[in-house]
Image (cartoon, helix red, strand yellow):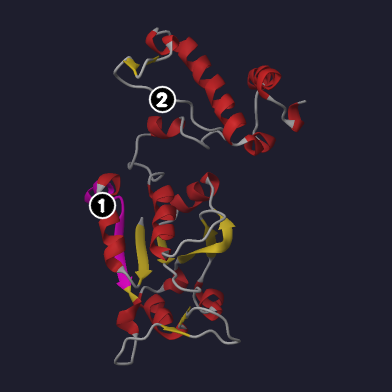
Amino acid sequence: MHIDILTLFPDMVENFFTNSIMSKAVEKNIVTYSIINWRDFTSDRHHTCDDVPYGGGAGMVIKPEPLSKALDSVSAKDKRVIYATPSGKLLNQKMAYELSKEDHLVFICGHYEGIDQRVIDEYVDDEISIGDYVISSGENSTLVIIDAIYRLIDGVISSDSLEDESFTGELLEYPQYTRPERYCNNSVPEVLLSGHHDRIATWRDFRRLEKTMLSRPEVLDSASLDTEERRKLIELLDNKGTCQKWT
């Protein structure tokens, strides 16, 4: 996959691609990337990229001309273009899987009060939100989206590591433990030390249901649970509360 990132702050983005798992994906040529500073596409001496909003109001809006020229420089109209914005569709694992199958993605990092709507109308395919809150940096939200996507590309992370993660199979991930066996007067659950794979699998399935019920109960309303998972869920509900779908 090739990723183009259009930003006013390239240094904020560069470090992401040169560290951790992403750097290994780049070294293996699984992911390639370009960082484009659309300030380079301005025509005035001050390299102006923003202006006051029509109709009044606080803040500044990203001007269409330099951003459009930057998008044209990467032939964005022939690519899938993503704009991270609080007013977009909420990012989820299904969306990340879909985007991970693309060969080329273009990301726009917004700032201030956002970008001129005409750029969105002309170029953007997906407006994506990372949550029901607002942050100052479009770079941070864009990198969250990229992080959710690239790790799902074949060869970046082993399939075994992805299999039991939260939202893979709809439920949250079970608790994880490592050495030492005892820490702060708490011991690792005995079943994990048993070496009995079936018992461990059963324990993990139960804990995934429990974690989902306690932290994200709304996820259960759309989860496809088999008979055994429903039985376990009912057992949990008898002790910890109610979930309207299963009562």
**Residue type of the residue flagged with mark 1:** Val
Under tag 2, what secondary structure?
loop
* Res 106 visible: no
**Residue type of the residue flagged with mark 2:** Gln
Check residue 29 for magenta coloring: yes
Query: Which corner quadrant of the image does residue 176 belong to?
Result: top left
Residue sitting at 33 percent across and 42 percent down? 156
**Tag 2 and tag 1, C-beta contact below 8 Å:** no
* Res 109 visible: yes
- Horizontally, residue 48 falls left or right of residue 64, namely left
What are the residue bounds of the magenta stretch? 23-36
State the separation of the CA atoms marked 2 and 1. 29 Å
Up the image or down, 165 lies above or below 131; here it is above
Residue sitting at 45 percent across and 25 percent down? 175
Residue named by callout 2 = 176
Residue named by callout 1 = 26
